[in-house]
Image: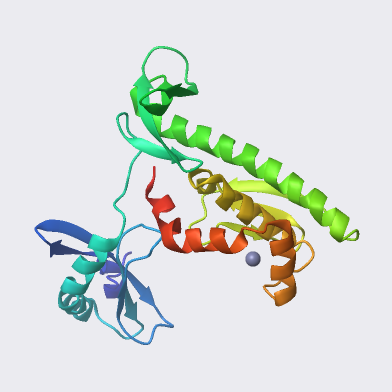
Amino acid sequence: MRFFNPARAEPDHIVLDIDGRDVRVEVRRNARARRYSLRLPAAGGGPVLTIPERGTFRTAQRFAEDHRGWLAERMKTMPAARPFLAGGTVPLRGVPHFIEHRPAGRGTVLVVDEEAGPKLVVAGDGPHLPRRLTDFLKKEARADLAEAVERHVGALALAHPSARRPTGLVIRDTRSRWGSCTAQGKLNFSWRLVLAPAFVLDYVAAHEVAHLVEMNHSARFWNVTNALFPETEHARDWLRRYGSDLHSYG
Ligand SMILES: [Zn+2]
């Protein structure tokens, strides 16, 4: 037998009309939330409205309506999604590459330099183009990060002979962090770093390698990072300004 549960029957989203466009707002209940809140995560994924424990869906709807102007403004300043499509562009190591689809041939991706600018030629079936391109970029990211990590680990070993070696390198699609280092010494990185200029990826690799000797963000940690990678401030500034743009691709 099924019982009607009003909490369960609650819709999981609200549709707001913003400048004539239907915008889906995810609705989430959070028992720890103190009040209603509406936010637009910088990492993408659309607006999210939080309902506090004793809140109601009806109030949430009104809250969303009241903040429609704010949301419209925020959405204008957010980078629009840029899917991987033939005819579009994607930056590779900070350089825009034109995306060309070549249906013939097996599913390979070639980097071709042309007078009009570099391009990525993706072979194979059209529907698979976004996945192929993503796989290719992940592979490039892994190669660049493996090289950078190895180089920084070598430099770290000279300055800190007792430094640990990394126990693994994992490439993922993290939304909140560009890289991380586990207590076991495993390094994780976002594949999207390969879209940024090369010095940015190099910095994030140096940052995570520095965590092999300093598992914190103390002054000592930043000294190690700066010694490994003198352009650290420049790269951090780049990520603060343009980092969220990297999430709009694909
Ligand atoms: Zn860190």
Q: Quadrant of ligand 1?
A: bottom right
Query: What is the quadrant of residue 182 in the picture?
Result: bottom right
Choose between 56 and 152: the one closer to the eye. 152
| Horizontal and vertical percent position of residue 124 | 41, 19
Residue at the outermost left position: 20
Query: What is the quadrant of residue 17 in the picture?
Result: bottom left
Residue 135 against residue 79 in the figure, above or below: above
Which residue lies at the image location 29% right of the left edge and 30% below the top edge? 87
Which residue lies at the image location 81% right of the left edge and 56% below the top edge? 156
Which residue lies at the image location 75% right of the left edge and 73% below the top edge? 220
Q: How many numbered callouts?
A: 0
For this view, does 142 lie left or right of residue 119?
right
Residue 59 against residue 110 in the figure, above or below: below
Quadrant where the C terminus is found in the figure: top left
Quadrant where the N terminus is found in the figure: bottom left
Residue at the outermost right position: 161
For this view, does 118 lie left or right of residue 223?
left
Choose between 130 and 112: the one closer to the eye. 112
Image coloring type: rainbow
Which residue lies at the image location 39% right of the left edge and 12% below the top edge? 104
| Horizontal and vertical percent position of residue 177 | 54, 60
Choose between 93 and 45: the one closer to the eye. 93
| Horizontal and vertical percent position of residue 223 | 73, 69
Q: Is residue 166 visible?
A: no
